[in-house]
Amino acid sequence: MTAPEPSRTYDAVIVGGGHNGLVAAAYLARAGRSVLVLERLDHTGGAAVSTRPFPGVDARLSRYSYLVSLLPRKIVRDLGLDFRLRTRTISSYTPAERDGRPTGLLVGGGERRTREAFARLTGSDREYRAWQRFYDMTGRVARRVFPTLTEPLPTREELRRTVGDEEAWRALFEEPIGIAVEEHFTDDLVRGVVLTDALIGTFADAHDPSLKQNRCFLYHVIGGGTGAWDVPVGGMGALTDALADAARAAGAVIATGHEAIRIATDGRTAEVTHRTADGEGVAAARHVLVNASPQELAALTGDTPPPPAEGAQLKVNMLLERLPRLRDTSVDPREAFAGTFHIAQGYGQLGAAYAQAASGELPAEPPSEIYCHSLTDPTILGPDLAARGYQTLTLFGLHAPARLFARDNDAVREELLKATLARLDAHLAEPLADCLATDAQGRPCLEARSPLDLERDLGLPGGNIFHRELSWPHAQEGTGRWGVETRHAGVLLCGAGAVRGGGVSGVPGHNAAMAVLEAGEG
C-alpha cells in the first residue's frame, strides 16, 4: 500500500482506481501533472478484474466485466498499453425448436454460412437480407458516432448532422427500437436476437417511451466503429493492470486501502478526506476526479443524491470440464459457445419476461446469454486445465431487476439461477451440471451474483452496471463541455455515470483528463 504525501497539494486526486480512474491518472501523469489515486479496496481495477474465484483451480476469470467494445484504440495508443484483444470467430448462436426438431441460428463463420443458417431456420433469404440492411445502417452510424466519444460533446443537432441519415436517426434516436425491429424483421427469433443488445443491464420493454432501451442498443452497436465485442487477452484484469502500470510509470501515486469519505471545495482547491485501517488523512488537490457513481459523488460532496439506480441482471461464472453437447447436432459446441449463446431470447419471450418481472414475478423463462472466453483466449486457464479441455462460461441474465431480490436475496438468486440453467439444459443433450468442474473442496465451479451482490461487492448503486441509465452521446442541459463536469468547479465525474459512460471504455476517464488539461494548472 503506497501512502500519499501528507503535506503535498496534488494537481489531481482521483477517487477510485477502476479503469476510468486509471485512464485519467495515466493521461494526467503523462502530461506532467502530479496525481494521487485513492482506492478503497486492496487492489485496483474495480469491476474490470481477473480473479481465481474457485479455490484450488488455476483459472483466471473476468469476474464482472468480461468483453471489450467501447475502448477506443486511441486510448491504448496514447498510453502505450501492453494490451491485446482477440476477435471472436462466431458472432452468436441461438438454439430453437422448429416443427418439433432442434435447430438454431448461427451467425458468423463467413457470409455463406450465415446466409445458409438464416435460410435453414426461416425457410428463405428474406430475414438474412433484412439483417444485412439493418446492420449496414447501424454500421454507418457507428463509424460516424464512435469517434465523437473522445471529443467535446456535440449538440444534438450536430450529432444528427454527423449521423447524416434521417432513417437511422429516427430508428435509433427518436422512436422506440421495437418499431425498427418489427419493421425490418418478421421472424420472432431473429427479432429477439436483435433486441437483446437493447436490454443488457437495462430493464425495459422494446417500446418503452423513455427510449432507455435505444440508448443501450446504441452503445452496444457503435463500439470501435464496428459494434464488435472482443475478448481481452489474459482477462479483463490485463487491461486494468496495464493501465495501473502506465499510470505509475508516468509518476502517479496509487494508494490502495484508502477510502475517500468527504470532498470539500471552495471552487479553487479541494480537500479529500480519506480513511485507512490506521485512521483518517487529508489530500489537497487543484482538481478532484470521482471515478464512482453519481450517488457516491453526492455523498462525498454533501449534495442531494440523484434518483436511485437499479440493476437488472444475473451474472454467473462457471468452469467446465468440457463443453456440453447440443441437441442441435448440426452445430459444433465449440462454435456455438464461441460467440454469444442466446437462451430464451425470442422476441415474444423477452416481452413476456419483462412483463412478469415488472409485475414483481421472476420470469417463467429467464432470458440470458453465455460467452466462452477460453475458446478465444485459452491463456486464462492454467496449462493443465487447458490440456484437459476445460472451458470457462460466463452467463449474463436479462430482466432480473434488483427489486425482485429485495425480499430474500439468497433465496431468489438460487431460484432464478435454477430456472435459468433449466432453460439452457432444454437445448443441451446432457445436463450442464454433468460438465461442471469442481474446486479443491469438491464443490461445483459456479458462482452467481445478483444486482444486490454487485452493490455490496463493488459499490454499484442498485447493482446497475452503468451506475445509472445510459445517456445520449450528445449535450443535454447541464452536461458541460465534456460531459464530466459537476456543479462544483474543479470536481469532475469520471466514472460510468458520466455522459458517454458505461461499459469498459475509458471514455469518461479520458474526457475528464482532457477537461483538467484544458483548465490549465489552476
Image (spheres, rainbow, N blue to C red):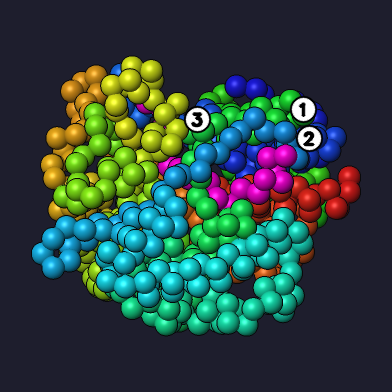
Q: Secondary structure at mark 3?
A: loop
Q: Which residue is mark 2?
A: 29
Give the residue drawn at x 68%, y 40%.
76
The residue carrying pointer 3 sits among few (fewer than 14), some (14 to 19) or many (20 or more) residues within 10 Å by Cα, namely many
Instruction: Tell whether label 1 touches label 2 (CB within 8 Å).
Output: yes
Nearest to the observer: residue 413 or residue 52: 52
369, 119: nearer the viewer: 119
Which residues, given as a range, are shown in magenta?
59-77
First reached walking from the N terminus: tag 2 or tag 1: 2
Q: Work out whether mark 3 precedes mark 2 in sequence or the reverse, and give the earlier one.
A: 2
Q: Is residue 361 above or below residue 229?
A: below
Q: What secondary structure is marked by label 1? A: loop
Question: Which amino acid type is marked by label 3?
Answer: Gly
Residue 347 on the magenta span: no
- Residue type at numbered disc 2: Ala
Which mark, by number, is residue 234? Answer: 3
Which disc is residue 123 wearing? none
Spatial distance from mark 1 to mark 3, Cα to Cα? 25 Å
Residue at 80% over, 30% down: 8
